[in-house]
Amino acid sequence: MEIITAHNDNSKYKTTIRSTSGNIVIADEPTELGGANLGFSPVELLAAALISCTAITLRMYADRKEWNLIDIIVEATSEVREDGSTLFKLNIKLFGEIDSKQKERLLDIAKKCPIHKTLLHTMEIDTKLE
């Protein structure tokens, strides 16, 4: 399992996220919440994980099938419902020579990306303080 670290060095809400593979992402809160808007908010990062996983899953599937899928754009919006649950709405745009049957299959495949499945099913989080 890859370890990802989040480091907040007392610079308000700006947090540097690092993966063991060397990638870096900055998270922050928007100015209206007291942040400096220097990076993605945590909710945006969650949406980004979902839509990037969706796009990658679609690309992998289309490539395996050797379909002429040129471009994939996935957009997300989210809203918190009255019961406290969150609804993500995804809009997928496919460009290329893709027929209606292939589009239907790709919609099914989009719902099978690992992040989509994780968010829909119960997960456990084990949090410890050192």
Image: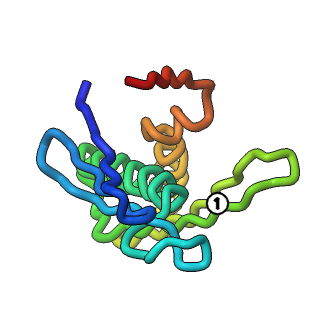
* Of the pair 72 and 52, the residue shown nearer to us: 52
Q: Is residue 66 left or right of residue 95?
A: left
Q: Residue at x 44, y 76 (%)?
A: 37
Q: Position of residue 115 (x, y in %)?
A: 46, 40
Tell me residue 52's x, y (percent): 38, 56
On screen, 53 above or below 73? Answer: above
- The residue labelled by disc 1 is 89
Compared across the picture, whether 48 is left or right of 108 comes to: left
Q: Residue 33 in the image: x percent, y percent?
A: 60, 71
Say whether residue 34 is visible: yes
With 43 as the anchor, is 36 left or right in this view? left
Decide which of 55, 28 is in the foreground and name it. Answer: 28
Q: Residue at x 50, y 67 (%)?
A: 29
Quadrant into which the C terminus falls: top left
- Judging from the image, the colouring scheme is rainbow
Please name the amino acid that badge 1 sits on: Lys
**Image quadrant where one finds the N terminus:** top left
Looking at the image, which residue sits at the far right?
82
Say if residue 98 shows up in the picture: no
Classify mark 1: residues with Cα within 10 Å, few (<14), some (14-19) or many (20+).
few
Q: Residue at x 52, y 33 (%)?
A: 118
